[in-house]
Image: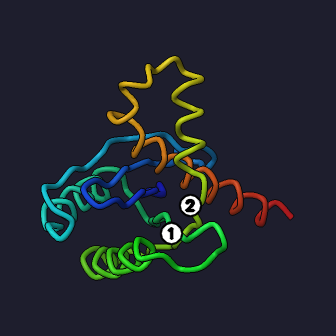
């Protein structure tokens, strides 16, 4: 069993997967699309990964404003959550994603990725950060 982490954007969805022990998250891939409302192929690709990797739970980044209020992007992410749940039958949990892009950039920098190549990796690494935050919180709550 694995957990999938997603970073939903206007033209991409970053994908990360947990290990089987649900301790660590690894960036997997970026699913790209031509337009924001073109989701059929995106949902189909996510479904392929879910089946191949035995995903039982999904965590989706919720891009709230810094003050915690809902943004337009957060509302779009929730609509995407609803479509993904309907398609897969798997519950999708929302995870606050404030500052995950900043953290993802720090990870890329620390790993020696040149700034001009960040775009190739940033969404998948942001999904990794979202998923790792979720796993850490989950493991803290079950450890106590």
Q: Are marks 2 and 1 in contact (CB under 8 Å)?
A: yes
Q: Is residue 80 above or below residue 47?
A: below
Label 2 residue SS:
loop
In this view of the protein, which residue sits in the foreground, 70 or 44?
A: 70
Residue 102: % across, % down: 57, 44
Residue 14: % across, % down: 37, 50
Q: Mark 1 packing: few (<14 Cα in 10 Å), some, or many (20+)?
A: many
In this view of the protein, which residue sits in the foreground, 29 or 96?
A: 96
Q: Quadrant of residue 73?
A: bottom left
In this view of the protein, which residue sits in the foreground, 15 or 100?
A: 100
For marks 2 and 1 on the same chain, the one whose residue lies earlier in the sequence: 1
Q: How many marks?
A: 2
Residue 135: % across, % down: 63, 56
Residue 137: % across, % down: 71, 61
Q: Mark 2 packing: few (<14 Cα in 10 Å), some, or many (20+)?
A: many
Q: Quadrant of residue 142?
A: bottom right
Q: Which mark is residue 62?
A: 1
Outermost residue toward the right in this view: 144
Q: CA distance from mark 2 to mark 1?
A: 5 Å
Q: Which residue is mark 2?
A: 97
């Amino acid at each position: 069993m694995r957990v999938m982490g997603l970073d939903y954007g206007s033209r991409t969805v970053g994908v990360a997967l947990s290990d089987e022990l649900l301790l660590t998250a690894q960036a997997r891939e970026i699913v790209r699309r031509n337009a924001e409302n073109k989701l059929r192929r995106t949902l189909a690709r996510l479904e392929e990964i879910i089946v191949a990797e035995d995903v039982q739970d999904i965590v989706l980044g919720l891009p709230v404003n810094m003050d915690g209020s809902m943004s337009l992007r957060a509302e779009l992410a929730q609509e995407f959550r609803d479509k993904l749940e309907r398609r897969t039958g798997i519950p999708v949990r929302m995870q606050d994603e404030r500052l995950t892009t900043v953290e993802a950039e720090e990870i890329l920098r620390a790993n020696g990725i040149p700034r001009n190549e960040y775009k190739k990796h940033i969404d998948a690494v942001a999904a990794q950060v979202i998923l790792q935050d979720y796993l850490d919180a989950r493991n803290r709550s079950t450890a106590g």
